Image (cartoon, grey):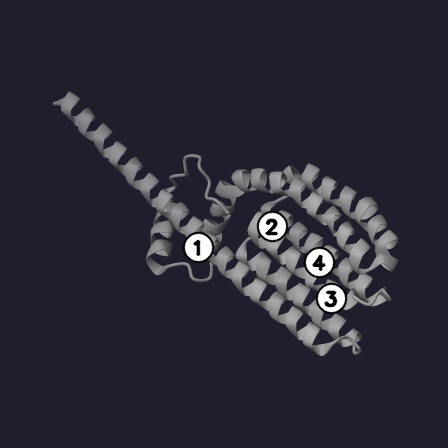
Amino acid sequence: MNPAKHEPHTDHSDANSAAEALRRGIPWLLFPWQLEQRYQADTAAERLKYLRITGWLSILLTQGFAFGDWWMVPDRFVAGAVIRFFLFLPAIAWWLFYMPRLTPTMRERGMWLLSWAVGLTQVAQVLTSHAPFAPAYLVGLTLIILVNGGMLRVRFWSALVIDLGLLCMYLAAVIALPEAPRALMVSIFITLSATCVFTLWGAYRMEHSARRVWLKSQVDAQLRAQLQSSIERFESMSRTD
């Protein structure tokens, strides 16, 4: 997530709040309500542009699961293809088309639903397949986590919610597959957990840095405004004299 590059607002109260937030630090990646709304508004345009570009790439990755379906769960290939091409494809396209009309919060919630829908589809394919390698296909949930953390750059709290949902899906699948090799299931769980930790840490550091940069821009803008006001006042006084 990158901070907005346009000239920041210079509201005095917001600048004071920004200075205070910068002094306290932002370990929870949240500002006071009014400042948070300003931050979301200032970064919305650039965030929207990035999401729309990477969103179209995510369509290719979503459809790419069809190759995994063919190799790992061939008896569920047709069902998976129908869902991916006739449900996910138009749903993602609609989401990207109407994204400019959605609020930043609604866009983040859309990523929740999309990630969970893709993960739930994969889990359902594994549970209903009779292919010998079907349980191993659960490792594909890792790809969803990597796409969210690496390509879409989902914000930290949204990424945490998505990852917890995917881990719950995996644990439910393990319970529903008592005959699956325990060593395989444990290995996949470790892989999923490690991927969650590393991508969440990256998301946290990236968002923390972006928020600090934005706070500094607010403080700097207010200082420049005060300096300009002082210069204009001195010039006015000199002309009067």
Amino acid found under the numbered disc labelled 3: Ala
Which disc is residue 32 wearing? none
Q: Where 28 sits versus 239, above or below?
A: below
Report helix, strand or loop for mark 4.
Answer: helix
Q: How crowded is mark 4: few (under 14 residues within 10 Å), some or many (20 or more)?
A: some
Q: Foreground residue, 11 or 104? A: 104
Q: Name the residue under label 2.
A: 105
Pinpoint residue 64: horizontal percent, then vertical percent.
73, 48
Amino acid found under the numbered disc labelled 4: Trp
The answer to whether the residues at label 3 and label 2 have Cβ atoms under 8 Å apart is no
Q: Foreground residue, 236 or 175? A: 175
Residue 117 in the figure: left or right of residue 9 = right
Report helix, strand or loop for mark 3.
Answer: helix
Amino acid found under the numbered disc labelled 2: Thr
As measured in the structure, the alpha-carbon distance from the residue carrying label 4 to the one carrying label 1 is 25 Å
Which disc is residue 136 wearing? 3
Asked whether residue 12 appears in the rendered view, the answer is no
As measured in the structure, the alpha-carbon distance from the residue carrying label 2 to the one carrying label 4 is 17 Å
Q: Name the residue under label 4.
A: 116
First reached walking from the N terminus: tag 2 or tag 4 = 2
First reached walking from the N terminus: tag 3 or tag 4 = 4
Q: Name the residue under label 1.
A: 208
Mark nearest the camera among 2 and 4 is: 4
Report helix, strand or loop for mark 2.
Answer: helix
Q: How crowded is mark 1: few (under 14 residues within 10 Å), some or many (20 or more)?
A: many
Residue positioned 50% across, 42% down in the render: 43
As measured in the structure, the alpha-carbon distance from the residue carrying label 3 to the one carrying label 1 is 36 Å
